[in-house]
Amino acid sequence: MQYIKVTPDYAQHVALIELNRPKALNALNLELMGEVRDALKALDEEEAVRVIILTGNAKAFAAGADIKQMADKTPIDMLKIDQFSTWDQIKKTKKPLIAAVSGFALGGGCELAMTCDMIVASETAKFGQPEIKIGVMPGAGGTQRLTKAVGKAKAMEMVLTGSFISADEAKHYGLVNKVVPVEMFMHEALVLAKSIASMSPIAAQLAKEAVNRSFETHLEEGLFFERKNFYMAFASEDQKEGMHAFIEKRAPDYKGK
Ligand code: DAK
């Protein structure tokens, strides 16, 4: 891997993917995105990994897609490159995915963070969709996920003016889960990841699917989907373990079976 670092911690059932192109503020070139896609797919298949954290560095989560790589492309180039298949694959990650964001999360960087299931932000994080300033518009979910997260008025302002919001504003609007001092953001993301990793990974996957379904369908269909996944949880040994551990007043030992 040239542009990312992958560090699995099998004992804690957590894996870390760090975007590692600091000189370009982690601008998301095609190669980096391909590496993220491949790493997520591989970690999704590793039984000992239950939760994945995606992060950058203190200065930048990612300052967007690589403008230098994109600037002279034609629509046919874009069609042939088909970045959407990479983004779609990332979205298909079954395990809970936490973005740990510090510094810039702009354009595709903000979209990548929003593709994750939760965001832990440092106080220095800045979120924005500044594509309008370079003559385009968001292309990887910015107009949709941002609008669902922060509401129409704020999303419209951000998308049409390219203005950034601070971590505290992002928290106020419900875009991020937690805001912590910069030296704590990785620690806090790990605490959250370990807490989820201590649950049944089967229940976590079924629950993640059901929550995500609420964005894609109407209430009745979403409730129907939820019900199916609820029943499915009863097919797992983890369900028996979880409920019996409660009755026996002991900590559950989930095996992911
Ligand atoms: N692309 C390429 N290089 C970038 C970059 C980017 N997005 N952002 C920063 N860099 C590079 C700078 O060019 C500079 O490189 P050198 O000049 O040193 O070689 C280095 O990173 C440091 O940047 P600055 O010198 O500009 O640093 P400052 O602290 O002064 O400013 C900044 C930080 C984040 C405010 C500024 O760098 C900036 O405005 N960056 C661009 C932000 C932006 O416009 N982002 C949106 C890009 S468009 C798609 C999926 C996604 C997308 C499109 C399609 N499909 C699935 C089809 C997404 C599109 C975008 O994200």
Image (spheres, grey):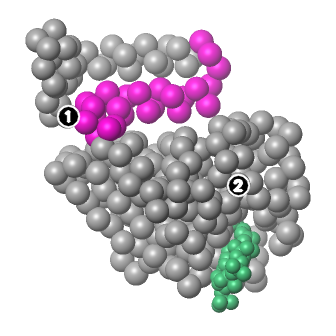
Q: Is residue 79 left or right of residue 16?
A: right
Label 1 packing within 10 angstroms: few (<14), some (14-19), many (20+): some
Query: Of helix, strand and loop, which one carries label 1?
Result: loop
Q: Is residue 236 left or right of residue 18?
A: left
Position in image of residue 173 (x %, y %): 71, 39
Q: Is residue 244 left or right of residue 76?
A: left
Range covered by the magenta-colored residues: 195-220
Q: Which secondary structure dominates the residues rendered in magenta?
A: helix
Position in image of residue 177 (x %, y %): 55, 41
Q: Residue at x 38, y 55 (%)?
A: 187
Q: In this view, does 244 lie to the left or right of 216?
A: left
Total residue callouts? 2
Q: Residue furthest top?
A: 247
Task: Name the residue that disc number 2 marks.
Answer: 166
Picture quarter with the C terminus = top left
Q: Examine the image and state in which quarter residue 79 appears.
A: bottom right
Query: Of helix, strand and loop, which one carries label 2?
Result: strand
Picture quarter with the N terminus = bottom left
> Which of pointers 2 and 1 lies earlier in the amino acid sequence?
2
Q: Is residue 76 visible?
A: no
Q: Examine the image and state in which quarter residue 24 appears.
A: bottom right
Image height of 212 relative to 225, above or below: below
Q: Residue at x 48, y 19 (%)?
A: 225
Q: What residue type is labelled 1?
A: Gly
Q: Which residue is drawn at 62% across and 31% down?
A: 215
Viewer-side residue, 34 vs 133: 133
Q: Which amino acid does label 2 sit on?
A: Ser
Image height of 245 relative to 187, above or below: above
Q: Residue 256 carries which label?
A: 1
Viewer-side residue, 86 vs 150: 150
Image height of 233 relative to 112, above or below: above
